[in-house]
Amino acid sequence: MKNACEKFSSKLGSSVIVLTTFDGEKISVVVKVSDDIVAKGIKAGEIVNKIATACEGRGGGRPNFAQGGVKDASMLDDILAKIEADIKG
């Protein structure tokens, strides 16, 4: 997923990318935030922590890249919509 995030980021430029996958056992989340958006105060580690907290998981990372895992995907759509709304302000 990290490679996919990097590819999307290089194509999109200024962006916040959130990818989730389910491998049959666990749900993983990866967030990539471009440097210009990090400069505005939006950090990948904080986004992953919000997702993980809402979905009974754990995660963390750097301001421009973070990853984590969640246990309860039932809240995933709601928290992603809230994060999107917060970013768009």
Image: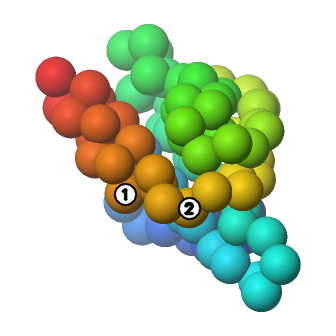
Amino acid residing under circle 2? Ala
Splitting the image into 4 quarters, where does residue 24 fall? Answer: bottom right
Q: Is residue 73 above or below residue 66?
A: below
Q: Is residue 25 above or below residue 60?
A: below
Say which residue appears at 49% left-offset and 38% top-offset.
Answer: 34
Label 1 residue SS: helix
Amino acid residing under circle 1? Asp
Q: Position of residue 17 (x, y in %)?
A: 46, 53
Describe residue 26's horizontal placement relative to residue 40 as left or right. right
Label 2 residue SS: helix
Q: Position of residue 65 (x, y in %)?
A: 67, 40
Q: Which residue is mark 2?
A: 73
Say which residue appears at 76% left-offset and 83% top-offset.
Answer: 23
Say which residue appears at 74% left-offset and 44% top-offset.
Answer: 57
Circle 1: is it few (<14), some (14-19), or many (20+) Cα within 10 Å?
few
Q: Position of residue 31 (x, y in %)?
A: 59, 48
| Colour scheme of the picture | rainbow
Q: Which residue is mark 1?
A: 77
